[in-house]
Image (spheres, helix red, strand yellow):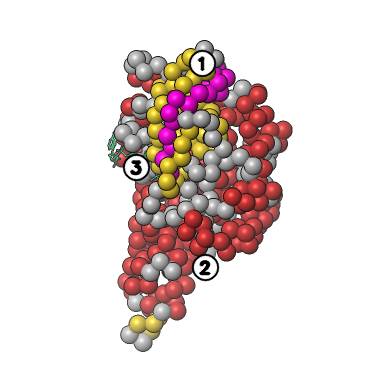
Amino acid sequence: MTIPYDSPWMNDDLRMFRKTVRQFIQESFTPHQARWRDEHHPDAGAWTKAGAIGMLLPDVPQELGGGGGTFAHEAIVLEELARVGVHFGSSVQSIVARYIHSYGSAEQKRNWLPRMARGEVVGAVAMTEPAAGSDLQGIRTVARKEGDHYVINGSKTFITNGQQAGVICIVVKTDPKASGPRGISIILVESGLAGYRVGRPLEKVGRHGQDVCELYFEDMRVPTSNLLGPAEGRGFFQMMDQLPYERLSVALAAVAVAERAVDITAEYVKERVAFGKPLLDLQNTRMKLAECKTAAHVGRVFVDDCIKRFIAGQLDPVTAAMAKYWLTEKEFQIVDECVQLHGGYGYMIEYPIARMWTDCRVQRIYAGTNEVMKEMIAWSL
Ligand SMILES: Cc1cc2nc3c(=O)[nH]c(=O)nc-3n(C[C@H](O)[C@H](O)[C@H](O)COP(=O)(O)OP(=O)(O)OC[C@H]3O[C@@H](n4cnc5c(N)ncnc54)[C@H](O)[C@@H]3O)c2cc1C
């Protein structure tokens, strides 16, 4: 009755890659999820294992230690993790790698990228501060130049991979007096320097296995050669350039979760009996699931188009914002509807649909809130 849909960017090489990644996650990550959740971060060894099978930095050139693939390889990793609800910070690892690859010196690339691809070093991006999230121009972390060093003071919050990070892209003000974005720079910082402190793991509503924490910097001295890019004052523009990658990553994970929610709910309502017949025989169940399946499919076609355009170098920031906003809204609506169709079991954390519900709420908040996405889209009107 239906012809199976295949993403237009898919090919045999990518299918093989998906099979390897899926099997690895199933064997090496899924069995440890309860412990990751208790400890609020993935096992330290998970990173090198993921590196060994080529799951980290799959779209970074091979000569820099990466997989030599395209964003399609990255998309597969993100989809496979999202499908089974494993919150491993490999997408942030890829984002950090893109900053280094796009703006780093040859020395910075050689120093960090091969080790990040092997999982020996974990990356984090530290933009958000207690008093500045959406309004990044309001950050207060300052890097003051003293000879051939910056002295950094300030703090960051909600930093994914924060506890495990070995290298952090810290967004700072190098010129606090400059107006607008021009005083903002990004500095690559090695964790563990004097004056660097990691806060406690933050207690989140969901995604308990994901490492998210605060970072503090007190008179932390960093060589000026750690500046990302050829000059100070480029940080804001570097972030604006890279955000479509992050937003597309969030959007495609949203579609993978929505598709999975429909699949597991369809199975559930075939098994669960009420009033002498499976829930699927109730017209409301069929209508709701038909709506969810249609919305997930529309999302799939849209995100596939974005992936294709990104690989071709043609995904503009406004379309990336549309994908991030619309697909995460749909994800939440679909998962919420699927919780409803599970009845009370949908609220029990041992059921995957309940975890999907708590886990996906934040998708509308991070990587730029959906309200900020709509503002961006509105500017293009
Ligand atoms: C689990 C998690 C992981 C995260 N990981 C990272 C990370 O690795 N690195 C990092 O730097 N940050 C990270 N963040 C931070 C995240 O990006 C911010 O929370 C987000 O950008 C929103 O900032 P805020 O929390 O300060 O909210 P605020 O900016 O205070 O926003 C509050 C509300 O006001 C609305 N609002 C703000 N400005 C506007 C506007 N112009 N128009 C309309 N409405 C507006 C927002 O949409 C929101 O509804 C993470 C957050 C979470 C929860």
- Disc 3 within 8 angstroms of ligand 1 (CB): yes
- In front of the other: label 3 or label 2? 3
Residue at 47% x, 58% y is 37
Examine the rendering and report whether any part of residue 49 can be seen: yes
Q: Nearer the viewer, residue 265 or 171?
A: 171
How many labels sit on residues?
Answer: 3
Q: Is residue 225 magenta?
A: yes
In the image, is the residue at mark 2 within 8 Å of ligand 1 by its beta carbon?
no
- Where is mark 3, residue-wise? 370
Viewer-proximal residue, 370 or 322?
370
Dot 3 amino acid type: Asn
Q: Residues within 10 Å of mark 3 (few under 14, many from 20)?
A: many
Name the residue tied to disc 2.
1
Q: Nearer the viewer's eye, disc 3 or disc 1? A: 1
Whole-angstrom CA distance, mark 2 to mark 1, is 59 Å
Label placed on residue 242: none
Image quadrant where residue 292 sits: bottom left
Horizontal side of 33 relative to 105 (left or right) equals: left
Q: Residue at x 34, y 77 (%)?
A: 282
Q: Which residue is mark 1?
A: 231
Q: Residue at x 38, y 69 (%)?
A: 348
Q: Which residues are magenta?
A: 213-231
Measure the C-alpha gap from mark 3 to mark 2: 36 Å
**Identity, as a three-letter code, of the amino acid under mark 2:** Met
Q: Nearer the viewer, mark 2 or mark 1?
A: 1
The reply, left or right, for residue 223 in relation to residue 347 is right
Residue extending farthest to the bottom is: 276
